[in-house]
Amino acid sequence: MDSLCSALRHVLKLDLDSDRTKQVAQATVLYLCGVTDAYEYQHYMKANVRFRDLDISAKDFRLMLVEKSYFTLNIKFYALNLCKATMNAENLQHFTQAFDIVRNDAVMLRRVFEDRRFRREMRASERLKEISLPDIDEDSVARTQADFNDMYQELMKHIRQKTFKKLRFLVKAENTEFSDFNGELLYKALKAYYMIVPTQKTTAHVLNYLRSTCTNHALNIIGMKTSDKRRRMVNAGSDGFGGSTFSYTCVSENQLASADGEESLSYEGTLNDQNQFDNSSMLSELNFERVVQQYGRTTMRRRAIQIVAGQDDSRFTRYLRVREFIRHEEDCTDFVTRTKHENVVVYLADHLGVPTARLEKFLKKVGTELIKHRSVA
C-alpha cells in the first residue's frame, strides 16, 4: 500500500472512477487531516465499504494508513494546501512536487477537491480554522520532522524511565532487550505526533501528549503480554448496588505442576463442577435472603432490594414500559443490567415515591452488608 489509489484499488477493491471511491477518498482525507476522528471514520467506512468480502476490517485499514508517514504527512499537507489555496493547474503541480505526491494520488485528490461543497465544508471545520497557510507551506514536512528531533532527547528520557519501571519484568521474562521496547514506544509516539500536526499547541503541551501516549502504550503492552489467570485479585462482577466484588486466587493455574506431560492441572478441575455450583448457589441465596429479611421490613424496602439485585418486579416493569425505557419483550431486570446504578436509583425512587437521596443511602447500607458475604456477587 504505497499510495492512496493503491490502497483504494488493491486493498478495498474499489473502482477508482466510481463516485463511491471518490466519497471514500474524501472521508479518508477528512480523517488524515484531523477533521473527523477514528470512530467517525471507521463508522463511515463500515457503512460504505463491503469489508465482509475483504480480508481486513475498517479498523485494520485505518491503522494501515497511520503506519505510513506518506499518508499522515505528505498526503495530509497536500490536501490541506488544496483546501486552503486556490485550485489551479500551477498550484496543483507545485504542491505535487513539493510534497512528493504519487501521480495517481494527485489526480484522485484533484477530483476530491473539485467538489466545491466538500471543500467548503472542510474549510468551515474547527480543525481548518486554526490552520494558516504558513503552517502548511512546502517546508512543513521537513519542519515537522525537525521539531520531533528537537523533542527526541526529552522524550527518550521518559521512554527509558517507563520501560525500566513498567516493562522490566517482561525484559527478564522474554530474555529481550530494553531497546526493543524503547523503539516500540518511540514509534508509537512518532505516529501520534504525525497525526496531530500541524498544531498551535506549545512544545511543552505536545511533549506531554506524547509522554501520555507512551505511558498508555506501555500499559497496553503489559495487558497483551500477561495472562488473566496470573491475577490474584479477580473482579467477580457487580454487587448489584453500584460496587464490585472481588475474589482472591490463592494459587494461579500456571503455578500448578504438569504431571507426566499431561495438560496443566487446575484446582478447579479437581472438584465436582456440579457440586461446586450447587454449593455456591445455595450459599448465595441464603446470604441474600438473610439480608433481605434483615433490611426488608416493609414491602417497599423489600421490593427496592430485589429490583436493584436484578429480580423481576411486574409493577416496576410496567412503569418502565409506559415511559418507553424498555421494549415490550423486556422487563426491569434488563433495564437494571444495562443502566448505571445512579440512574436506576433515580427512576426507582420516582416509581416508589420516595426521595432519591434517601433510597440511595438505604441501598448503600444494604450493599455494604452484602459485600461482607464473599459468596454473593
Image (tube, rainbow, N blue to C red):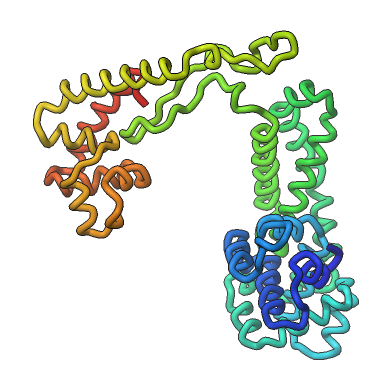
What residue is at 26 percent from the left and 46 percent from the top? 332
Say if residue 262 shows up in the picture. yes
* Left or right side of 38 for 318: left
Q: Position of residue 51 (x, y in %)?
A: 67, 62
Looking at this view, is 8 or 150 the one in front?
A: 8
Q: Position of residue 329 (x, y in %)?
A: 30, 54
Residue displayed at 62% across by 59% down: 38
- Residue 197 is drawn in which quadrant? bottom right
Q: Is residue 166 left or right of residue 229?
A: right
131 over 199 or under it: above or below: below
* Horizontal and vertical percent position of residue 265: 62, 14
Q: Quadrant of residue 243?
A: top left
* Residue drawn where x is 68% and y is 52% of the image: 206
Query: If the image is split into quadrants, where does the N terminus sit?
Result: bottom right
Residue at left offset 68%, top offset 41%: 217
Q: Nearer the viewer, residue 124 or 222?
A: 222
- Picture coordinates of residue 371, whole percent (x, y): 33, 22
